[in-house]
Image: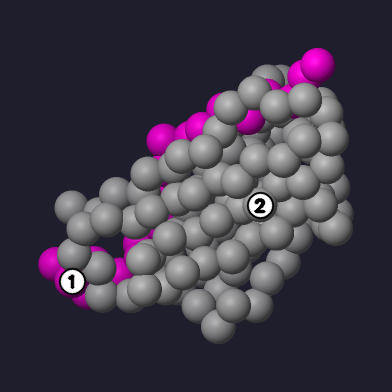
Amino acid sequence: QVQLVESGGGLVQPGGSLRLSCAASGSIFSIEAMAWHRQAPGKKSERVASILSDFRTEYADSVKGRFTISRDNAKNTVYLQMNSLKPEDTAVYYCNADITPVATMTEADYWGQGTQVTVSS
């Protein structure tokens, strides 16, 4: 059974930094795109950043220059380094990935359970 498990959220002051991690577990054949999304109360979900298996990245305009997405293919893990955090970055952050499990050999979209990031003084 394939799962995504996030970690690294918490409370940070404005201007601070946090690093989120998301590890995929289970019997996995391959992982293509991996991404971070966020949802703040009363707002639409936003894709924050994505990274392909060839390490090409894309970012939402709201986080360009402040957030960096990376991945470790050997560990089936994606990271989100968040610097210069602002109160408007407060949200639940979710990772998702396009994973092909060994059991099915069919690519599917998997999501983590979410981790809370709160930016406040």
**Residue appearing at x 85%, y 58% in the figure:** 65
Disc 1, SS: loop
Around disc 1, counting alpha carbons within 10 Å, would you say few (fewer than 14), some (14 to 19), or many (20 or more)?
some
Residue on which the image places disc 2: 81
Which span is picked out in magenta?
A: 99-121
Residue, disc 1? 102
Report the side of 1 relative to 33 (left or right): left
Which residue corresponds to the image point at 83% horizontal and 57% vertical from the top-left? Answer: 64
**Is residue 84 or residue 90 the one in the foreground?**
84
Identify the secondary structure beneath mark 2.
strand
Location of residue 39 (image quadrant): top right
Q: Would residue 110 be visible to someone looking at this image?
A: no
Measured along the vertical axis of the image, is residue 15 above or below residue 31?
above
Magenta stretch: residue 120 in it? yes
- In percent of width and height, residue 6 lies at 44, 42
Along the horizontal axis of the image, is 94 left or right of 27?
right
Q: Residue at x 36, y 66 (%)?
A: 75
Task: Choose top left, top right, bottom left or bottom right for residue 15.
Answer: top right
What kind of residue is marked 2? Answer: Gln
